Amino acid sequence: MTKEVNGIQWFDNHCHLGEDAESVIESARSAGVTRMVTVGTDLSESKVAIKIAENFENVWATAGVHPHEATQGTHGLDELLDLPQVVAVGEAGLDFHYDHSPRSTQSEVFKEQIGLANEKSMPLVIHTREAWEETFSLLDAEGTPERTVFHCFTGGPTELESCLSRNALVSFSGIATFPTALEIRAAVEKCPLNQLLVETDSPYLAPVPLRGQINEPANIIHTGRVIAEIKGLTEEKVAQVTTRNAEIFYGLNKIN
């Protein structure tokens, strides 16, 4: 059963649910966030995400290896991607800010996951930080999957154009609500509605006015409100369009 708040239903297309999943999901649904994708960051966390998706209606999972965890490799990932609850590969990519894994290893593991997404005709969820050109170069060399999303977009209009030119979707998180995030807000303004998604990336990146708190999917309404303001649309319109985009992107329109 789903709930609506003022007739509006949101889809959090990228969150990280954990041990408190039941209460977090209940809170989200009370706020009108009726669907969500919980994202894997390594093999063990991907299995946790899949188990949560098995136990809750309108929750799906991804399976992937985050660049921080690239040294773990991708052994066993192929089998997880075949499970019915898994709707995407990722999150995968490059993070040259922290360099928790060697850059060469990050690149190799990212290439492997691009290959899996292409082989299985699955969506690819990308994490990129301070590695835009390297990310684009690898995608061009390996073949950008037909369905690709740059999650928690932190670029500006220039990076946005590079994403859009590869037919990728762009997902905006609570960072878009930060008054100092001028480049990201400029990207929101320029992003076509049919290539735009919203997310919380919870439990991280709580939006204004909840900065410093533990984030959760219920808080996506704050990001959605800011996106609506920037684009001169109603919140309901943003919710409708981004929900539809997520359904198509993850292939849920074929499942439901």
Image (cartoon, rainbow, N blue to C red):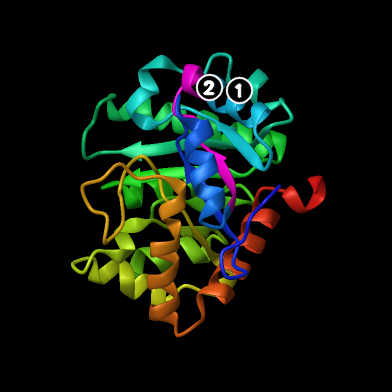
Q: Quadrant of residue 158?
A: bottom left
* Residue 142 in view, yes or no: no
Specify whether residue 233 is in view: yes
- Residue 118 or residue 88, whichever sits in front: 88
The boundaries of the magenta stretch are: 34-46
Spot occupied by residue 194 in the image (x, y as percentages of width and height): 60, 70
Viewer-closest of 203 and 150: 203
Quadrant housing residue 37? top right
Instruction: Tell me how far mark 2 sits from mark 1, CA to CA.
Output: 5 Å
Using the image, tell me which numbered label, if any, was put on residue 48.
2
Query: Which residue in the protein does label 1 denote?
Result: 51
From the top left corner, tell me how far across and down residue 251 is, in percent: 72, 48
Q: Is residue 144 above or below residue 112?
A: below
Instruction: Identify which residue is drawn at 54% across, 28% down.
Output: 49
- Inspect the image, locate mark 2, and give the three-letter code of the amino acid beneath it: Val
Residue at the spot 36% in from the left edge and 63% down from the top edge: 159
Element class at badge 1:
helix
Residue 39 on the magenta span: yes
